[in-house]
Image (spheres, grey):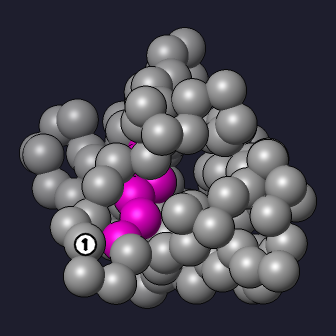
Amino acid sequence: VQLVESGGGLVQPGGSLRLSCAASEFTFSTYIMRWFRQAPGKERELVAQITNNGRNTEYGDSVKGRFTIPRDSTRYTVYLQMNSLKPEDTAVYYCSAMSIESGTTYWGQGTQVTVSS
């Protein structure tokens, strides 16, 4: 399983970005997809996740109401739609896929998001 993130960049406070995580072909129905982020000097934190069946999503408290995690199974892609961005959202964002069968977690290389005026 290979995961490739894209869509990061520099955005002004209050702006929006959409990150993409393109997966090598695999069955979404057997993987929980997650977005994490890590800011300098801080621990990696869970931002959002979507269950293997796509029915349930969860969000970190700091992003609730601002971020969503849609996915397109036909494109083997999961997204992170980020709205009303704040400077504290600045971090490297990572996509992960966890197999519900083996528990193995795969990671992407990360994409930088910088929120600054």
Relative horizontal placement of residue 27, taking residue 107 as reference (left or right): right
Residue at left 25%, top 72%?
42
Relative to 96, say whether 54 is above or below.
above
The image quarter containing residue 33 is top left
Residue at left 58%, top 84%?
112
- Element on which disc 1 rests: loop
Q: Position of residue 68 (x, y in %)?
A: 67, 36
Residue at left 43%, top 31%?
61
Mark 1 residue type: Lys
Q: Is residue 78 at all visible to an observer of this figure? A: yes
Nearer-the-camera pick, 9 or 2: 9
Q: Position of residue 6 (x, y in %)?
A: 69, 78
Q: Position of residue 58 (x, y in %)?
A: 45, 25
Please name the residue that numbered disc 1 is placed on: 42
Which region is colored magenta? 33-38
Relative horizontal placement of residue 43, taking residue 61 as reference (left or right): left
Total marks shown come to 1
Please identify the quadrant where the N terminus is shown.
bottom left
Nearer-the-camera pick, 85 or 51: 85
Q: Is residue 1 at all visible to an observer of this figure? A: no
Relative to 88, say whether 14 is above or below.
above
User: Does the magenta segment cover residue 68?
Assistant: no
User: Does the magenta segment cover residue 35?
Assistant: yes
Nearer-the-camera pick, 69 or 41: 41
